[in-house]
Image (tube, coloured by chain):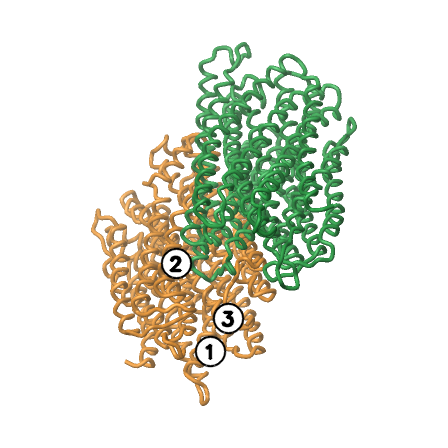
Chain colours: A green, B orange
Amino acid sequence: MDMQTMLYLIPLCGVLALLFAWVRTRWILRQDSGTERMIQISTYIREGAMAFLGRQYRVLAIFVVVVSALLAWASALEQGSSILIGLSVAVGALCSALAGFFGMRVATRANVRTAAAARSSLNSALRVAFSGGAVMGFCVVGLGVLGLGVLYLLYSRLFAGPGIGDNEVMHRTITVLTGFSFGASSIALFARVGGGIYTKAADVGADLVGKVEAGIPEDDPRNPAVIADLVGDNVGDVAGMGADLFESYVGAIVGSLVLGVNAELAGGGGGYTPMLVLLPMLLAAVGILVSLGGTFLVRTKEGGNPGNALQVGSIAAAVGMLGATVLVTRWLLGDQLYVLDGREFGAGGVIGATVAGLVAGVAIGLITEYYTAESRRPARSIADDSRTGVATNIISGLALGMRSTAAPTVVLVAAILVAYQQAGLYGIAVAALGMLSTTGIQLAVDAYGPIADNSGGIAEMSHLGAEVRGRTDKLDAVGNTTAAIGKGFAIGSAALTALALFAAFKTTVGLKVLDLTNPTVMGGLFVGAMLPFLFSSMAMRAVGRAAFRMIEEVRRQFRSIPGLMEGTATADYARCVDISTRAAIREMVTPGLLAVIVPVAVGFYSTEALGGLLAGVTASGVMMAIFMANAGGAWDNAKKHIEGGAHGGKGSDAHKAAVVGDTVGDPFKDTAGPSLNILIKLMSVVALVIAPLLR
Amino acid sequence: MDMQTMLYLIPLCGVLALLFAWVRTRWILRQDSGTERMIQISTYIREGAMAFLGRQYRVLAIFVVVVSALLAWASALEQGSSILIGLSVAVGALCSALAGFFGMRVATRANVRTAAAARSSLNSALRVAFSGGAVMGFCVVGLGVLGLGVLYLLYSRLFAGPGIGDNEVMHRTITVLTGFSFGASSIALFARVGGGIYTKAADVGADLVGKVEAGIPEDDPRNPAVIADLVGDNVGDVAGMGADLFESYVGAIVGSLVLGVNAELAGGGGGYTPMLVLLPMLLAAVGILVSLGGTFLVRTKEGGNPGNALQVGSIAAAVGMLGATVLVTRWLLGDQLYVLDGREFGAGGVIGATVAGLVAGVAIGLITEYYTAESRRPARSIADDSRTGVATNIISGLALGMRSTAAPTVVLVAAILVAYQQAGLYGIAVAALGMLSTTGIQLAVDAYGPIADNSGGIAEMSHLGAEVRGRTDKLDAVGNTTAAIGKGFAIGSAALTALALFAAFKTTVGLKVLDLTNPTVMGGLFVGAMLPFLFSSMAMRAVGRAAFRMIEEVRRQFRSIPGLMEGTATADYARCVDISTRAAIREMVTPGLLAVIVPVAVGFYSTEALGGLLAGVTASGVMMAIFMANAGGAWDNAKKHIEGGAHGGKGSDAHKAAVVGDTVGDPFKDTAGPSLNILIKLMSVVALVIAPLLR
């Protein structure tokens, strides 16, 4: 098979993923939506979620148009750049937005059908929820591969011509393609920050006034913020996580492409290295096929453990990917040796690096699970410390989060060193790709969580009875574990992707070394290390302000709507949804602009300082992300542990302390922490995109 | 004046500082100690504090002997090293320990005399408290300069001989002298960590059981942990801060020496640069004289503001030091130009760099004051957020701490860039020195705080009446502000000192560049960035465990000692003191060893990795230190603001929330945060000390 044929096959795999998503969507829509009340509730949720997405995308459209135009203009002035980079940015943003749009549309239909299916059996409920997640997962990988693949074909046609070598065409194509990753990152940042603010404002509002002040249970229809809370699960966990992994996925591919095109054939003489460019795209395409296969293994029996079913699917996909990587890489690279940045490597090294990435991804996920799971010692020790009050609960959670940075860092560093030893800087990029090649099924598992969570809420609000609620609770509990693992995985892949983009930046900008003993680099490092702190603070304060407005509104409704507490009047759900939406959109702007403007400003001051900044923001951002995600997750599960009957159970003093810890952990784990994943990738990709202008 | 004469004059300035400390001590001891009850209480405090120091030093003696012996042995095997480095370590540790010993002895005598003097006037109380602080301050600078100066003379005698040039003698002398800084750092680490654990275990125990459960006021003699709490102020804030600044002070001098001896005369040909070696020692010596002058300006009137009096002293010293720096530098360096690491500089550049350091120190102090002071918006916004409960108080404090990293980082980076631009790497070292040259009076002001605090406690326990208590409260309130500024100053100077030591490490180990795009360096950076998180977690958990034991004991005493609550029986203070002491000693060991072993292990794996580690630990450590110190300080003052009558005052729900925030902040600001200052310097100095073995 020649290269041209393969280049056409790659986007076809993307199309296949989208077809699969479409088939699953049709199947989901054919399922029963339950009673009229269920349909009504789910309509509220869907409308709220789609309204948020619509408004968010309108704001982002302005941002993307302005940035694309600026970049196209700046690039047009610069020799060797192309105004087409603006197109890449726009298409990247569009693909990310479309993935979010489709994924959320289906997720907000799958939730009610999951609840309806739970009336008959656990397995059918699992299948609906997982199918909903799979639509999100395969939209992400499908649009990623399709978008990149088509743009690649398009650009290489446009650049080709008489008097220009294949190598030069490939170089130009890939330089322009980096914009795709930047487009994806911008959407991701706003989706994560905005979604995170939305979901936590609604959650805190619903909990503090509804559960604590009014004393009504979770997901009670009398609570005016309950719909906003359910919408929040979708915009934060479905759309947010989707955009996050879309960004990592695309970033890892683009980073590999840039490093691949800058490599040379070993043995001197340089030359044309199309195989190293083809390989990452082909691995991504094959990853789609393998993930597809994995989805068919996800099924369970009544009384069975849905968690096992999901694990069988992911593990099978990972093992399959391992085999596929060996075959594809050996076949494509053969015995040819390559050299990049003074290091030689061949097929064996590339395989080794990919395996390092895959293993590290799994290991970091499992470590995260250990630190946050309800059944493990760390979360239980927080529950124990809740007995002596709120202060000890908080200190215990903060200390746990800080401590939990150690093991993932060691794993990450080991993966970096192994990948580099195996295949140089290219190895680091393919390690990230190895982690992310099965994103299709990984994300399906992740997005399953909020759908299951939503179905529980709908079951509760529609009074479906204890047996049904028991089934949805079982699905939901699994969702909490998969969410923890997914968060660890997202952080690990973000770190590796950021490093791959960092290496690509260095290669593009032509920096031979980035000397840490140069105070300009050190200054950049300090500023970079500071940014995740500043950014987290902004995100947390935004949640605080938004939650405050929500609290006021919920209190107002309880006060002024007669019959609400008695259940004879309906709450004004729409108004709460609107408050969350407005607040999230308004509050996402400043942190978002900060993340884009700082690297540009620093880069034009000094390329060395920008290099230091990227290293600093990555190192400190990864620590803060792990710290916040794990502290938040552990606080949450410590509370659940007490609610399960430990230390006096619900209503005890220990429980009250644990509730406070959980509330503090909410903006940690669902707003600030996950936003940092994006921050580190976005800054690297901004640097990579402006790199040709800095040379 | 020739160099030899000056080299003798330098230790004489150290002697002068010690003489001054001795004179102040005699004066303090002549003051009235008040009533029999006051004497009795202060005896308890003094005995507790000295017992802790004694036990701590016994443990440290073993550590220092083992480490000195290991280093001497390893150095003896290595060409170009000397076993005398073991002696340097031991003397450095001894000097630090002696400074702590003298400072604490006097502080625990000044406290009761301050209370006694407060019976007559505010000014006389201020003078006693400030004199007590001054003894600590001048013991630190005196022993630092004396120790370094005498060792310098001794080693240069020993190394001199036929067939060895002056340049080579100076090189060897300074290489061996680095051990002095390492000795100082080891003591500092254990003093900070141990002292921090001690003081917070006692404080939390006293507060939670005494104030919250038993409902008795602060510093009430019925509280069994009250003496331990007062002892804690001394071991944490007097001895801990003293050891911290001793380490920075010595580290900045040693860093300058190493960089000075590695510089060359400009214009090619290399050569002998004694003036760059003499300069840092001479600046330190002159700083002692200027600080001495400043102390005479600290006086106030009845009804006056003691804060102004302290500020007049420090500012006069800073301005005086500015002038002295210009004169000394111009005189010593003349028109000679030097070159280090490819950058040329002369007297003007050195002066510029020193000024940059001085200005940055003051600016960082003021920024810290802004973020933590009771009268400013940041702390007040935490007080506002306490109205909606504990969770919002905690989130607000955490967000504030994170946000507060931004401005100090910008100031620090600006100082680094200016200093480097003015005088290359040598400039960074003298900037640190510029910040620290007036340590004598700075530390006097810092150590004044806990003495004033203690005097208030003694006044309360001895029922001295409202007027006296009013005066001590006034002194104490000023102490809170100076403590905040002092903490900012300690962090800023730690960062610059660490960078100076880092530059010295790079020069010594002969690294031309430390390439951040080398994954080994990047791996080191990640591990380095992680360590402050792990270390903070260990410190916080240690406080938690120690506090738990204290809580149990205080509860036991209230339960089992009949008449304690009624005031007819005396609490068993000694037992609480003993619990704090044992816990602090036991808990300081693991984090202490971690800080020493990790850089050694990483260094022997790879010098590049060690370089990355140092950069990572410094960048992330500075952020964490600022975050924790400022969050803790602001929580404390938000509580004070509410206690002053805001939002319902004492006993309101807002107050209860603020008390929890303050409790969470305690291990932040008094244990983990300040320990990080030491961590970053210690790791750099360990690297510098083992550098000759890594070449």
Which chain does the residue under circle 2 lie in? B
Callout 2: SS: helix
Q: Residues within 10 Å of mark 2 (few under 14, many from 20)?
A: many
Which comes sooner in the sequence, label 2 or label 1? 1
Task: Name, please, the residue furthest toward the bottom.
Answer: B162
Foreground residue among A684 and B92: A684
Answer whether labels 2 and 3 touch (C-beta < 8 Å). no
Which residue is identified by label 2?
B416
Q: Amino acid at mark 3?
A: Gly
Which residue is identified by label 3?
B510
Q: Are marks 2 and 3 on the same chain?
A: yes
Question: In whole angstroms, how far apart are the C-alphas of marks 1 and 3?
Answer: 15 Å
Q: Residues within 10 Å of mark 3 (few under 14, many from 20)?
A: few
Which chain does the residue under circle 1 lie in? B
- Which quadrant does the C terminus of chain B fall into? bottom right
- The residue at the point 48 percent across, 19 percent down is A575
